[in-house]
Amino acid sequence: MLKVRDLVTQFRVDDHTVYAVDGISFDVQERQLVGLVGESGSGKSVTALSILNLLAHNGRVVSGDIEWQGNSLRNRSQKEWTQILGREIGMIFQNPQASLNPVFTIGDQMIETIRLHTKCNKAEASEKAISLLRQVNLADPELRMNDYPHQLSGGMCQRVMIAMTLSMSPRLLIADEPTGALDVTIQAQIVRLLASLNESLGMSVLLISHDLGVINQFCDYVYIMYLGKIVEEGPPKLIFESPQHPYTQALLAAVPSVHSNHTYSGMVVSGEIPSPINLPTGCRFHPRCPFAMDRCTLAVPELYPVGDGKAACFLVESSN
């Protein structure tokens, strides 16, 4: 369905060229829920914005390809992008309240969106909006239609955004940290909702998150990003029970409840993620890696096959 191949996205920041995404490849298959994981600054959100052609004015995709349904999205006209975005690929963002217009009611915004993409009249669009709000488990949808965004909680606003996205019947939903601004209880409800929609509607989901518990519970396949590169990929069972890359092990070490019985639970990684303006040579994780060798400072490891997944680490290469 969605194929990203050797994607490189750069930004111009003052006199520097920053490679926020640097040669990544991944797939999202039909009806699949795929997780893209990494700490802040790893390039997850830039990847999503690159796919949707929504980069800031100083950013651009410089090489690689993005295929949707077998057709390249590179060099499409604005009209073609408009036809694809929303209708075929939808997106929800981290801060739902910022995505809604504060001066219009929920009903006005949903009705406008539905009529923009369908041939419904206003009454039909209103009925569809109420049905969609009910589908995303928003209580009292008829009443919520008359509310303004500031009258709803963050979780309720996120349900509204999901309903608006569903109104266009996308084949793929990209969810960029959809629970980041919500409290823990509501986070679980929203992700469970996305998983149920994935199953009931057959809609593929690309879930971008730093929450390993969520990724482990709901995703069919997982990609781990670090400083613009994918360093490990595989099914959740492999990633969470037998992680091969030291960075993946470090991420899991920070969440004891996920891995308390594993040998890497005591792993400590020093330092902070380097600036993308001054990237390390070789493996980008080597300045923080407790297993780094001289070779790691000189060469960039490829993604070596391991089990049902891959890991970009020379330790994996030597064990094969």
Image (cartoon, grey):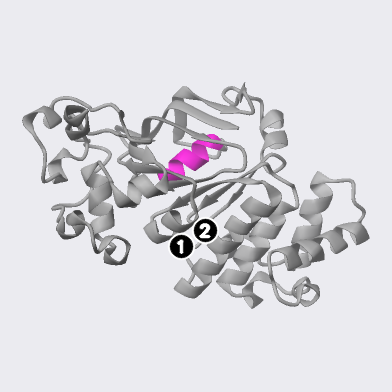
At a point 90% along the width and 51% down the height, the residue shown is 120
| The stretch drawn in magenta includes residue 49 | yes
| The stretch drawn in magenta includes residue 32 | no
The 10 Å Cα crowd at callout 1, few under 14, some 14 to 19, many 20 or more, is some
Q: Position of residue 87 (x, y in %)?
A: 72, 41
**Span colored in magenta:** 44-51
- Look at the numbered disc 1 and give the secondary structure of its residue: loop
Which residue carries the number 1 mark? 180
| Magenta highlight: main SS | helix
Callout 2 touching callout 1 (CB < 8 Å) = yes
Q: Position of residue 174 (x, y in %)?
A: 56, 46
Which residue carries the number 2 mark? 178
The residue lying toward the viewer, choosing from 67 and 318, is 318
Q: Position of residue 48 (x, y in %)?
A: 50, 41
On screen, 36 above or below 264? above
The answer to which image quadrant residue 276 occupies is top left
On screen, 313 above or below 261? above
On screen, 318 above or below 238? above
Q: Position of residue 284 (x, y in %)?
A: 22, 36
Left or right of 122? Residue 22 is left
